[in-house]
């Protein structure tokens, strides 16, 4: 069971299942919206995800034709990304997940647009764009 919440704890959620994909996204949108060099996401099965509290406090930002970003309207915490190309998955921001749930080996995506001041110092696979 994966559980998480936003900074103000208004939005709370859980996912009954495993993390299917574990990625560090370096695209400019993720960097700006997370205020960091990259954003880390845990992909979960949409059918196994549910909100426990605060669903009415969510806001949606259509960051592109393909992606909707869901965040808390009170504290601004990024909760997840819904990708129209993958309707059965949700990409939950690891910054909102409690603890350290088991996850597959990660990878870096969109390194072609990573912050020029950030250096990737691990041996994880890197993709210029989205992972194949």
Image (cartoon, rainbow, N blue to C red):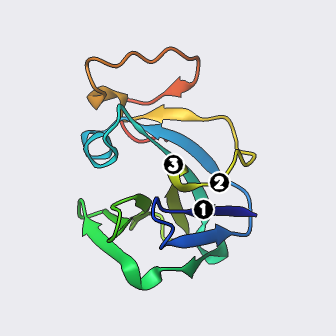
Query: What crowding class fits label 3: few (fewer than 14 Cα within 10 Å), some (14-19), or many (20 or more)?
Result: many
Query: What crowding class fits label 1: few (fewer than 14 Cα within 10 Å), some (14-19), or many (20 or more)?
Result: many
The residue beneath circle 2 is: 98
Residue at the extreme bottom of the image, as rendered: 56
Secondary structure beneath dot 2 equals: loop
Chain-order first, disc 1 or disc 2:
1
In the displayed structure, would residue 111 be above or below residue 83?
above
Query: What crowding class fits label 2: few (fewer than 14 Cα within 10 Å), some (14-19), or many (20 or more)?
Result: few
Which residue occupies 31% across, 28% down? Answer: 114
Secondary structure beneath dot 3 equals: helix
Residue 27 x %, y %: 31, 39
Q: CA distance from mark 1 to mark 3?
A: 9 Å
Residue 25, by quadrant, is: top left
The residue beneath circle 1 is: 4
Q: CA distance from mark 1 to mark 2?
A: 5 Å
Q: Are marks 1 and 2 in contact (CB under 8 Å)?
A: yes
Residue 75 x %, y %: 35, 63
Q: CA distance from mark 2 to mark 3?
A: 8 Å
């Amino acid at each position: 069971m994966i559980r998480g919440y936003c900074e103000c704890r208004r939005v709370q959620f859980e996912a009954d299942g495993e993390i299917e994909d574990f990625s560090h996204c370096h695209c400019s949108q993720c960097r700006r919206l997370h205020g960091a060099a990259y954003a880390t996401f845990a992909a979960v099965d949409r059918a196994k995800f549910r909100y426990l509290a605060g669903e009415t406090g969510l806001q949606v930002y259509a960051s592109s034709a393909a992606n909707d970003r869901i965040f808390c309207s009170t504290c601004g915490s990024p909760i997840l990304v819904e990708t129209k190309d993958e309707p059965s998955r949700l990409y939950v921001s690891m910054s909102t997940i409690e603890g350290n749930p088991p996850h597959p080996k990660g990878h870096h995506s969109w390194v072609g647009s990573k912050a020029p001041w950030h250096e990737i110092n691990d041996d994880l696979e890197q993709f210029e764009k989205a992972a194949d």
